[in-house]
Amino acid sequence: MLRASVYVTLRRGVLDPQGETIKSSLNRLGFEEVVGVRAGKYLELDLCTEDAALARPRLEAMCRQLLANPVIEDYTLEIEELEAPCDSA
Amino acid sequence: MLRASVYVTLRRGVLDPQGETIKSSLNRLGFEEVVGVRAGKYLELDLCTEDAALARPRLEAMCRQLLANPVIEDYTLEIEELEAPCDSA
């Protein structure tokens, strides 16, 4: 079994009102050293396959089709192998 | 300047309806190898400080107070140093 970590972030230059709100709130709580926040998504996908080379292009297709909006978001993939067999998922 | 990456994930055992929905959608799109999805948040914080040792406990305080819900969520921190000086943020 493979586990993929997918990080979806807004592209540079795209306004991030959620990040701005978090930054203001942290500043108000006394964390004045925070000068910028960007908010994104983190997804962990368990894949019932052993072939990481095949899994990567399929994960990229998942990102393009569903997980990220390619117009305003970038994504990063990390793939690791899990010891667990598929049926224990 | 420091950049902190904060990963907020649901604790094991906490129901994740968003992840379940993403899994079902991926399966419907033909990605049948996806057997589990956990959804979380990914935050990038820029901190105007050079002291990583001091920054870590403050980041943990931010997570406890605002960024994560410690009852149902876990968080992971990574800190890296940026070349850029503070005023360019």
Image (cartoon, coloured by chain):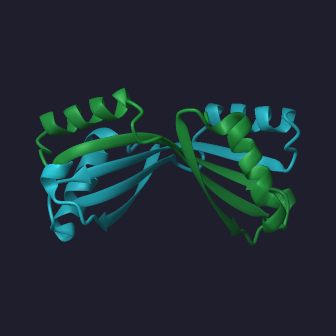
Chain colours: A green, B cyan
Give the residue displayed 30% in from the left and 58% down from the top: B3
Residue A58 x %, y % = 80, 51
- Front-lying residue, A36 or B11: A36
Residue A51 x %, y % = 84, 67
Q: Is residue A48 above or below residue B67?
A: below
Give the residue displayed 13% in from the left and 34% down from the top: A28
- Front-lying residue, A38 or B19: A38
- Front-lying residue, B33 or B74: B33
Residue B27 x %, y % = 84, 38
Give the residue displayed 88% in from the left and 45% down from the top: B32
Is residue A26 among the parts visible in the rendering?
yes
Residue B4 x %, y % = 32, 57
Image quarter for residue B65?
A: top left
Is residue A62 rendered to the left or right of residue A20? right
Is residue A38 rendered to the left or right of residue A83? left
Q: How many marks?
A: 0
